[in-house]
Image (cartoon, rainbow, N blue to C red):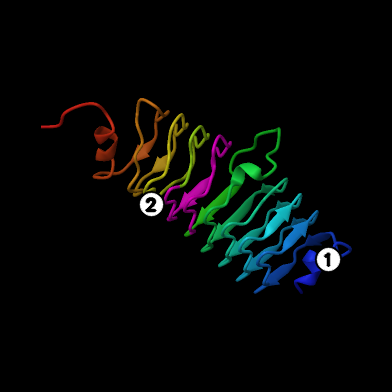
Amino acid sequence: MRNEDLTYADGEKEFSDALFERLDLRDKAVTSREFHSCVFKGCDLTRASLVRSRFTDCRFESCNLSLAKLPGSSFSSVVFRSSKLAGVNWTEAAWPRIKLPGQLSFEDCVLSDAVFLGLYLRGASFLNCLAKGADFREADLSGAALRGTDFSGALFGGTDLSGADLSLARNYAIRPDDNKLKNAVFSMPEAMALLYCMDIKLQ
């Protein structure tokens, strides 16, 4: 598959079961395309603009989407593995009115400085990721799998983490009085950070 197949205005609009390998789409725009059960491997989409496009049951493996723009694009049952998505503002994407859990899965990904502010991410997976400085304020992460992820400097406030699995997650600063934590799972000694965020003295 060539870059032009995705970037030309009069190019093909729908792709099913397609494999995209090592495409260089840096700073390019992909507009009004639909991808069904497609796989992207080793593609560079740094600063790319994915505009009003739809991704359904797709996988991104070893791709770079850092600083990509997502205006009006939707992602349904999409998996990102070993990929870089630093600085992506997910609030730009189109989110369905009917809220379905588990629409996004990140495994071994870089999500530093990504923005998930106020998004419905119930049942999503963030496994063994680097989410340094990511913004999860007001997001619904209930039932999410957050195992093994580094949350250094990540923002949590008004976040629903009910039933979320944060076992082996680390470097988080989550105030129990400002977030929903019912039935959430934490590991020691990292869970001590929950106490440090409270106005109490430990002896």
Q: Is residue 1 visible?
A: no
Q: Residue at x 67, y 60 (%)?
A: 48
> Could you tell me which secondary element the residue under label 2 belongs to?
loop
Q: Is residue 131 toward the left or the right of residue 13 in the image? A: left
Name the residue located 46 percent from the left edge and 29 percent from the top edge: 158
Q: Residue at x 27, y 39 (%)?
A: 193
Residue range of the region highlighted in magenta in the rendering: 109-133
For marks 2 and 1, give the one nearer the viewer. Answer: 1
On the rendered structure, is 119 left or right of 147? right
Q: Position of residue 65 (x, y in %)?
A: 59, 60
Q: Amino acid at mark 2?
A: Asp
**Mark 2 or 1 closer to N-term?**
1
Tag 1 residue: 8
Q: Is residue 114 magenta?
A: yes
Q: Which residue is mark 2?
A: 150
Q: Mark 2, residues whose alpha carbon is within 10 Å: few (<14), some, or many (≥20)? A: many
Pinpoint residue 72: horizontal percent, then vertical percent: 73, 45
